[in-house]
Image: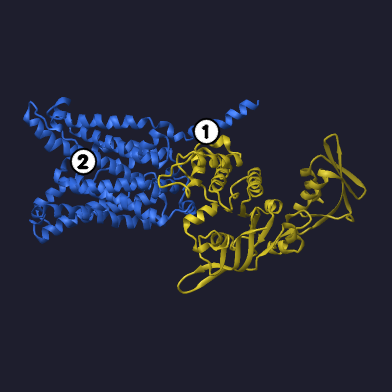
Amino acid sequence: MEAVIELENLTTGYRSLSNEKIITSEINTSLLRGELVCLIGPNGAGKSTLMRTISGDQKPISGKVFLEGKNIHELTPKYLAKKLSLVLTERVHAGMLTAYEVVALGRFPYTDWSGKLKDSDHKIIQEAIAMAGADELADRTLSELSDGERQKIMVARAFAQEPQVMILDEVTAFLDLPRRVEIMKLLRKMANESGKSILLSTHDMDLALRGADRIWLLPKGGSMQIGAPEDLILNGAFQEAFATEGMHFDSQSGAFRIHNNYDTEVALIGEGDSATWTQRALERNGVKVDPDAKILIKVQSDQDQNVWIIEQNGSETEIRSVYDLIIQIKKN
Amino acid sequence: MASTITTSISTPKSKVRLASHSRLFLFPILIVGTLVVFLLELGIGSVKIPVSGIVNVLIGSQVSDSTWSTIILELRLPRTLAAIIGGAALGAAGLQLQTLFKNPLAGPWALGLTAGAQLGVALVVTSAAVIGSSFLEKFEFMGNLSIVAGAMLGCVLVLMVMVTVSKYVSTITLLIFGLMLGFLAQGLISVILHFTNQSQTKIYAGWNDGSFAGVYWEHFPVLVPMAIVGLVGGWLMTKSLNAFLLGENYARSMGLSVKRTRLITLGCAVLLAGPVTAYCGPILFLGLIIPHLARGLFSTSDHRILMPAVMLLGAIIAQAADLFVHLPWEKHFLHLNAVNALIGAPVVMWVILKNKKMRGFEI
């Protein structure tokens, strides 16, 4: 597939007269047409600097960024705006502009000095709004919208700019889970159906693992790892990048787990949701689940009613909730 | 079913969607309003002149009372035209500053531009006194121009300070800073005037009380071209100002040169606020409130609509305020800024109460 963005020995950072501070070094990779790439990494790894350098907003220390074969830092702002659009973390206060008018601003690079919209512009704006599933929002002012609706409109605006590449910086940061999933689905649609190349930086590991075609993993101080999400888990890059005290990435469940110092051991017998969540509650409270343990907990589900039975030293105790179970175990 | 789908697609949604364009019918009303207030301004005063009299004077035909011609042409017409230009200019400058500083209470006065202009004028008047008191009278046009240049230079200096400070402080702090800058300028002006003779101090004291009545025909060759350049410039920048509503980062990503837009827009604001302050003195509140009234009336933030709206509204409100001042009051002399405060202060209070950002909960 054709590369829309190429990074060639790209080293980002800040340069002042006296010294230079390198943030990320020697990155070589590309963003293909119709590809959705998530840039992830711990705080302070240099995601934002890299994003700003790729979007042409900041000059690199060395190396180059190519957009369709042209050095992005030599393009005129107007040309660049027709090829690349941005969605940012910042909340937009657009006064009394309606959502439609905000999306219409995506046509900025194409309209004349007065900003007059032609019929063809209106058509593109309406398509962008329909794509984002934001038809009902169009007539409302931006200030009336929720954070999630507002970001949806900003994504539609970026789409109406008709770019080859959309760059989104932490756009889901303030959104709840359903809204984050919704934005991710929307971006996938834009990549698949319209062939946009999308680069999204995010803190949301789970969403990145499920939604991205490729992941650019930027560890703190290390070199960037690139691959399908699954590749990065299987080769251990993911676990390494996010290894911190008291936490580890569990490659079985694809989620982070908090380490505990276990002081009690129990054996757990049971099936399904009730067993899974019981184990989680136990681990959270520093109880290790081990089949050989002396204390045995049986989880039984009859008629939507869960019952936990603790067997210890030949005696049985029946308990009706996870909360009471934990209290009982802690007593021992 | 199929037929309903076809109709919903073929409906020209574009016309329905731009809600902000639904109040365009207000423009003819504003134009008529401007003309009505214009006629009232010329007709009402200690001497009442009927509309037919006004029209005859304006088209140069004979009128029954020869004093009418003098009153209109020498007193009321220049004053009214100054109010029209001043109102439109201050309204446009206020809109530009509010968008550029992302501050709903910005305006030539609140940001200290007015004070800067006053300081500039005081400096010019004083240096003229030092160089030779006859300077201003001898080279009338040059003196005229140097006062305007002083005012604009003062505006530019204040703007440079405010733009720098705005990078480090919040919306509200910036306004306080602007007010303090104003007090500082006032203090400096008092000190400077100490070095002039009494008659000049008197002239300044009169001017320091803002009024459209101090503008004479000889001022228009300077005032009008500058206002026109500022207004046309402002009109040309409306598209860019719309992009600015989303913030500088988004504006830049749409291909806008942020630096150039800032420079041109601030330049226009100086061209609009400087000369008006130079000739009319400090006109309070108008630049701040007119953009809000325009937004409320047209229910939009689209500068392509707001820019002409603030010009017309500015012309109407400035004329109306001036008319109120010049009503035949029996015992009392009203100040223009007192009237402006009566209209302006409640609007500012309303903006503060309405706007979350202004209440300080959200920066």
Nearer to us in this view, B272 or A108: A108
In percent of width and height, residue B142 lies at 14, 55
Residue lying at 84% horizontally and 40% vertically, measured from the top left: A307
Give the drawing colour for chain A.
Answer: yellow
Q: Quarter-wise, where is residue B128 in the image? A: bottom left
Chain that bears disc 1: B
The chain that appears blue in the image is B
Sequence-first disc among 2 and 1: 1
Residue lying at 80% horizontally and 45% vertically, measured from the top left: A325
Q: Is residue B150 left or right of A131 when viewed as pictured?
A: left
Residue lying at 52% horizontally and 43% vertically, measured from the top left: A103
Q: Is residue B132 left or right of B215 when viewed as pictured?
A: left
Chain that bears disc 2: B
Q: Is residue B306 left or right of A297 when viewed as pictured?
A: left
Q: Residue furthest bottom?
A: A18
Residue beneath disc 1: B13
Q: Which amino acid is tagged 2?
A: Ala
Determine the secondary structure under disc 2: helix
Of discs 2 and 1, which sits in the foreground? 1
Nearer to us in this view, B33 or A205: B33
Give the label on residue B332, or none: none
Give the label on residue B82, or none: 2
Determine the secondary structure under disc 1: helix
- Quadrant that contains the N terminus of chain A: bottom right
In percent of width and height, residue A190 lies at 63, 47
Q: Residue furthest right?
A: A314
